[in-house]
Image: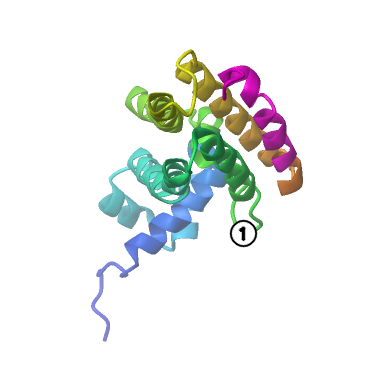
Amino acid sequence: MAERGRPRAFDRAEALQKAMLLFWEKGFQGASMSELTSAMGINAPSLYACFGSKEALYREALALYEAGDGAELAAAIAAAPTAREAIEIYLMRSAVLFSRPDKPAGCMVVLSVIHATGTSDEAGRALRDARGEMQGVMEARLRSDIASGELPAGCDPPAIAAFYATVQQGMSIRARDGATRAELEAVARGAMAAWAGLTGPQA
């Protein structure tokens, strides 16, 4: 006879993955507790016992997303031979990631600026930091190419990184509105056409 009152065992990593997908699709406020527990295959007491709160679960889900897609993009930027190639890969790879048929459209971190209603000030700061992290990665890569002579000393890494981060964030919104991979790649190519004007004729 089964032991009464014993909580049903579940796979925490799998439950977190399912919560991430739901938050990615609906945002913090849009994902109700009943939807979360249904998607995760657990009851509300188990969710609170394991994750602490809905907001704590959301922040852990964001960290999981960043460890996946975010880490992939950061690694691609670091590994590219030049800063120009790094940013082109960043945009073109984003077009692929944002339009996968088996995942919610767009970037979870970018969409959090729209979906974060109801989170605490602390969570809001964490989200802003997350959105700025990739811009910082690009800026560091640009500075590296200036130091090596690949780019002219007169370049403005913060401005260039901000431009391409804004393009990528716009691509995320376009993906959520139904833009295809081909349409997003066209945006990426258009943005790369601005490279010479942003970096100067010597680039």
> How far across and how far down the image is residue 161, in percent?
50, 24
> How far across and how far down the image is residue 115, in percent?
53, 33
Q: Quadrant of the N terminus?
A: bottom left
Asked if the stretch drawn in magenta spans residue 44, the answer is: no
Give the colour scheme shown.
rainbow
Q: Which residue is mark 1?
A: 102
Q: Residue at x 45, y 49 (%)?
A: 72
Q: Which residues are magenta?
A: 185-203
- Compared to 166, does 59 lie above or below? below
> How far across and how far down the image is residue 167, in percent?
62, 28
Q: Quadrant of the C terminus?
A: top right
Q: Amino acid at mark 1?
A: Asp
Q: Residue at x 59, y 38 (%)?
A: 88
Q: Residue at x 36, y 29 (%)?
A: 126
Q: Residue at x 52, y 50 (%)?
A: 22
> How far across and how far down the image is residue 33, in percent?
45, 47
Which one is in front, 188 or 14?
188
